Image (cartoon, helix red, strand yellow):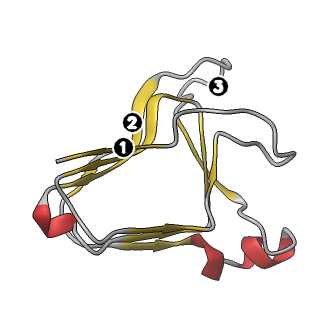
Amino acid sequence: MKHTVNASVLDASTDDSFGSNGNRPAIILSGDSDSDGDGDVANGLVLYDIPASGSVVRGLIFQGFTTTAVDIVGSQGNTLAGNWFGLDANGDGNITWAEVRQ
């Protein structure tokens, strides 16, 4: 995915699919670009530098990234809430969910 270079709000909990899934995340950001079961993309979302500070990421499922689901590089005051990292709809799986670098 591209770097987020300005403060952004990515709130999937406001989507109808969130409520119809029992108030659980339903929108998936996948690092498996060719659907072969192997991750192909290193980082899911990158919050890059000071202008991205104050971003909100809520209600998403991050799966299949080879490095991190969320890479925070030099930005501050971000909110990550109500997301599933590395889990499928059954709650199975695992990945490194976030890396914070200054």
- Left or right placement of residue 32 versus residue 99 in this view: right
Mark in the foreground, 2 or 1: 2
Residue at image position (71%, 63%) is: 25
Q: Are marks 2 and 1 in contact (CB under 8 Å)?
A: yes
Mark in the foreground, 3 or 1: 1
Can you tell which mark lies on residue 1?
Answer: 1
| Sequence order check, earlier mark of 2 and 1 | 1
Alpha carbon distance from label 2 to label 1: 7 Å
Type of residue at label 3? Ser
Type of residue at label 1? Met
- The quadrant in which residue 16 appears is bottom right
Q: Which residue is mark 3?
A: 35
Alpha carbon distance from label 2 to label 3: 16 Å
Circle 3 crowding by C-alpha within 10 Å: few under 14, some 14–19, many from 20: few
Type of residue at label 2? Asn
Residue at image position (68%, 20%) is: 37
Can you tell which mark lies on residue 43?
Answer: 2
| Sequence order check, earlier mark of 3 and 1 | 1
